[in-house]
Amino acid sequence: MASPMAHSRTQLLMAAFAFSALWSSVLSITRYSIPEEMEAGSFVANLATDLGLDVRSMVERKAKLDVIHSRNYLDINKDTGELIIREKIDRESICMTKTASCFLKMDVILENPIRIFNIELEIMDINDNAPVFRRKTIYLDVSEATPPGERFSLTNAVDADVGANSIKTYYLSESKYFNIDIQTGSDGSKYVDLVLNGNLDRETDTVHNLILTAVDGGVPPRSGTASIIINVLDINDNAPLFIQPVFEVNVPENSGAGTVVMTLNATDLDEGTNARLLYSYTLYTSEKTQELFSLDRHTGEIKVKGAVDFEENQNFEMHIQAQDEGSTPLLGHCKVMVSITDLNDNYPELTIKSLKSAVAENTAVGTLIAVVSVSDRDSGVNGEVELTLSQQEILPFILNQSSEGYFELLVSKPLDRELQSKYEITLKVTDKGTPPLTESETFTLEIHDINDNAPTFPQSFYTIHVMENNLPGALLTSLSALDPDLNENQYLVYFIMEKEIVNTSMSMLFSINPENGDLYALKTFDFEREREYLFHIEARDSGVPPLSSNVTVHIIILDQNDNTPVIVSPWRAQGSVVEQVIPRSTDKGHLVAKVIAIDADSEQNGRVTYQLLQISDTSLFSLDQYNGEIRTTRMFSYRDPRQQRLVIVAKDNGDPALSTTVTIKISTVEHSMAFSETTELPLEYDVFTDLNLYLVIGLGAVSFMLLITILVIIVLKCQKPKPIKIPPANRNSVISRNSVISQRSSTIADSTLISSDAYWYSLFLAETRKGKVVVRQPIIPKGAGYFVSSIPRSIGPSETTESRASTLEQATRRELP
């Protein structure tokens, strides 16, 4: 291809030939033709030659170039007469109108003389401008509902060049939806329309980007492009669509208000208001479901609104629609299945039916106490329950499952109200959830009493010591029996089981309060007459049938120091002085006399000691304080008076002590009468003294009692009582008592103390020559020195104590000969 410079030169030659031809035809106007855009200094024409002027004359005549209505693009070389390019010429800037020809008019002016030559310089167009679109980017909005064949006007491109260098055609980038239609105007301008070839779908192609190219007819051709951006306008041709038609979601029960269940996200391929969705329940959704769950109208968020309880409803079905906001709204539907997940939120339920609030203590084992039903509203392991009985190992009850969810509470061991009068029974039901929940219920079972316990005394044998000379009506003791039963079964009545002693009833000697068992003495007791009493007291309850038991009461009369010692030796008349005669030749230690005193009291109260109260000469006589012997401590001298007076006091050991005195007048003689120590001389008394009277009365009483005892023994022998073993302790006590009596009887002759049993003896005293006391054989029957009364066999113990052997009967049998 030829360079632009060669091309310019060719045009210049062509212009020169044309100018010569024109010059020959029209001499008045000189015309030249040059292409635009020639470089500065380029040769246009030789004016001197063309105008027929001499080159020197042009200088002399000051030839100059005057451009009309334009810039001075040309200049004259005065040295050569040539017309040259002074400044590059742009045809489009000189001829702004799109005309086929463009002339630059100028005058060549010569002076001396003035001459004007008209020159026209035609500026020929070259393809130096490419087509240009007024807008580089063309935006079109086309509805997807536009039918095929629809035309859209596009902005045309412009080209400053003219003729063949102007816009020749348009090209459109490849598109299956659009093409162009080129139109030619009356002025030859090219117009282009965009034509729709197919159906648009905004959801498939929202925007179409096309390139429109304008090409001119120059050589080489120039082109310009513009971008066409076609926005496909949406129509509401797509309904909302959910990801899936059915959604399944699990919600734990008891979820708090505001808990998000799920968020629905329907899609709409449309845009704008056609794609804005509103969610709502359809009529197929129950009111209960709508009360428990809220649906956000704009976001599709489903939240818990009410109390969700698995035990009330386990499943909920929601029918939800999504509606766009198009002018003609379209709908989409889905279904949400909500399953409530069970939690261990329900405590087990325990119901006690057919409950007995009280039972008798003789209720049989296996008796039904209550029927218990258990349940749990939860499901699965949360609803599995276990019923237990607290402290079952120590309670006399057991649970037995009778059927599904039902248990029986039964008596498993014999009941005893006296051990436990009521039971606090706690039933506990526990489910198997995590964590497990427990419910319990406690009720009280009363045990009613029956008369199954006989009264019992704290001890089976009571020994009560009573001081003699007591006041009648004095309280001896309180014999309270115990009965663990209740109410009338516990109300006790006390009474003395009747027996007689020497025709005297026990109820005449003693009295017992039937309500509280207080035992009273009805008479004043005398130890010297009766020393003990033995009888039974029975306690009987008020039950039906009544039960009873008895106890043996042993009343022991205690001795009181109420008897003054009585001096029985040496005998003297009441208030008289005892006279004693001894020889003056008596040796030292000679027994002058022996004072013997007896005391009806017993033991310490009956122990007598002797003391010298008055004595004429303390150096002559001595007194043994225990045996009452008065002996000489030295031999008599001629200085000693012939008569000595001794006052001796006999005092017992009681508190306070009682005493009596005897006065002995001792006379000394030169010679004494000789008596045989082995000869017993009975004393004869002319006067029947008070002591003898007492002895006779005592002997009669003892004989009478002996007779009564013999009769009782005969009666007992005839009844043939059952053999009863005698406890060793009792046997020894009886033996010891008899031995004491025998010892007392046997020691009288040995001048020992005479006890209170002296009232039961007939004493005959004699004083021998040496002062020894001789006691004759007692006339009281053997074995009658210690008598114990017993309960008659006709009045025995009650049935409840039939097995007990009466200690009274034992005592009686021991005293039998």
Image: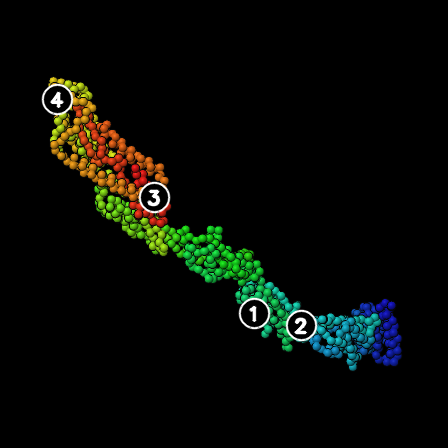
Question: Which residue carries the number 2 mark?
Answer: 270
Three-letter residue code for mark 3: Pro
Please state if 291 lies on the left or on the right of 195 as rendered. Answer: left
Q: Nearer the viewer, residue 331 or 661?
A: 661
Question: Which residue carries the number 3 mark?
Answer: 721
In the image, residue 269 lies at what x, y percent?
A: 67, 71
Residue 580 occupies which quadrant of the picture?
top left
Three-letter residue code for mark 1: Thr
Direction bottom: furthest residue: 186
Q: Which of pointers 1 and 2 lies earlier in the amino acid sequence?
A: 2
Q: Callout 4: 10 Å neighbours few (<14), some, many (20+)? A: some
Q: Nearer the viewer, mark 2 or mark 4?
A: 4
In the image, residue 91 lies at what x, y percent?
A: 79, 73
Question: Which residue carries the number 1 mark?
Answer: 289
- Secondary structure at badge 1 equals helix
Q: Callout 3: 10 Å neighbours few (<14), some, many (20+)? A: few
Real-space CA distance between mark 2 and mark 3, rounded to the nearest whole angstrom: 128 Å
Q: At 55% from the left edge and 70% from the top edge, which residue is drawn?
A: 288
Check the picture and name the quadrant holding the N terminus. bottom right
